[in-house]
Amino acid sequence: MRGRISLAVVAVAWAGCASPTVDDEAQGSGTDVGGGNVPGSSSSSPRTPVAGGTGSSGAATDTSTPASSATPADSQPAAATSTASDPAPSSSSAQPNPSSDSPPPPSSSAAPIPEVTLAADPASVDFGVLPSGGTLTRTVRIRNVGNTLARLGTVTGATSPAGGVTVSSALDGLVLGANGEAFLDIAWTQVATDQMGDVHIPVTNADGYELVIHLFGSMQRPGATCSCPSAVDAVPLQTLSLTATCTDPDGTIGSYRWAVETRPGGSTSNPTPEDQPATSFFLDLAGDYVLRFQGLPLRGDPVATCTVPIHVVPPQNLHIQLVWDTDSSDVDVHLLGPDGGAYFSSTEPGDCYYSNRTTSWGSASADDDATLDIDDVNGFGPENINVLSPAAGTYTLGVHYYCAHGASPPTRATLRVYCNGQLAREMQRDFSLSRQFWDVATIAWPACNVTEDPRPLRDVTQGCSP
Ligand SMILES: [Ca+2]
Ligand SMILES: [Ca+2]
């Protein structure tokens, strides 16, 4: 039995038994005003369905065209999952002849029952407020989190009133291996004031099983509009001041709300205050963000919204970013330069880490030195090591689980390497005990060839007692 108790919403449906219940808190909040131009999607490679790939961070992203994609955001609500056991193989003929006196067969050594489990991220999609006839496409990540392959049937979508949704055929007939994932584009058209719908993803090798994704949207009140700042280019750790406005001829708008719609995985920052037209927003990580501003009546759904795309690019040529997923714990990033050195050593050429935050590598110039900007000691990161203009050579990356501080294992560390402003590699590892060290990778500069180190975690003497 797989643990799914903590899910915020479980959108489970067996064929013919679709449940319309939805937790509002778990909805996405993607909306667009003005016919579906969605900002903030600036990354390059189109997403294509991948069967059997290992899971990587990712979530719903708005797309302005079906082929575009945005930086994955781990901030989305908990994925919906539903589960079904595979039809039992016809193994009865292989069983001993059952007898009422026979003890039940031992189960402790039995192999796990093949189980199909699909998860959607986000669990449901709220297309927010659109003008009449407005369209918006959002991408949902579908993962096979079960332990056997899932053969997908034909994906269908429908709305009430009819005519408000189309789904891509990317998943039709796809076989998703365990841990495989694929992406489904859902195109929504606002045809009525309040509109609901759902998408059904059947699995043909699990009788009667399907995953259902619920959809929502509402129509913008005529005449009400909001205006946001235009797209922002910024650098990590910058704090933005943003002001938006709404116009509302009939005086319905009585309050406002800022929210983060898209963010880089591991980002935890939120607009402050969230309920005023003027707000500030700390850019805790490199990557792409979209903030949404909503004009709200005293009660009910927003009547108009706008968005601010924010593109955060590290100005240094080499930017190493570490985040992790447990509160209170202390994880550290380490970087050795082309002249070598030893981890935890401040003797030049030193290790760039919490106790030697600025190195004196290479030339007399500081441009080829490494600097750690933050030593986060109580959860989530980020901590970044930057080198403005790295010298040619091989850099060596490590991550140290300094102290769990009571965090329940595992703590998953995510390390991202940015070269010349572009994300070059994302790597993850789970830690279970303080004093574990992850030999992550080497980076050959200037080619930015990242070579992962296959070694398992090793224990070191530094850190608090496990
Ligand atoms: Ca730390
Ligand atoms: Ca130097």
Image (cartoon, grey):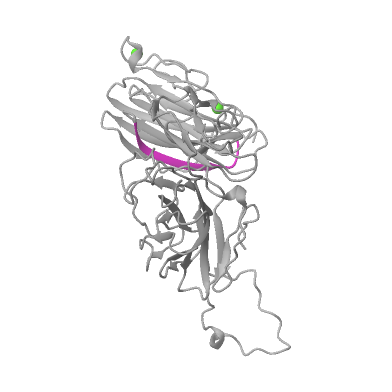
The picture places residue 192, in percent across and down from the top left corner, at 49, 56
Q: Quadrant of the C terminus?
A: top right
The picture places residue 172, in percent across and down from the top left corner, at 37, 66
Q: Is residue 339 above or below residue 31?
A: above
| Camera-side residue of 394 and 136 | 136
The picture places residue 45, in percent across and down from the top left corner, at 31, 45
Residue at 45%, 66% in the rendered image: 149
The picture places residue 458, in percent across and down from the top left corner, at 51, 38
Residue at 42%, 70% in the rendered image: 153
Q: Residue furthest front?
A: 250
Q: Quarter of the image holding residue 401?
A: top right
Image-based side of 64 in relation to 98, left or right: left
Residue at 59%, 44% in the rendered image: 410
Residue 425 inside the magenta-drawn segment:
yes
Q: Quadrant of the N terminus?
A: bottom right
| Camera-side residue of 345 and 183 | 183
On the question of residue 214 being in view, the answer is no
Magenta-colored segment: predominant secondary structure: strand
Q: Quarter of the image holding residue 379?
A: top right
Ligand 2 placement by image quarter: top left
- The span picked out in magenta is 422-434
Residue at 55%, 37% in the rendered image: 295
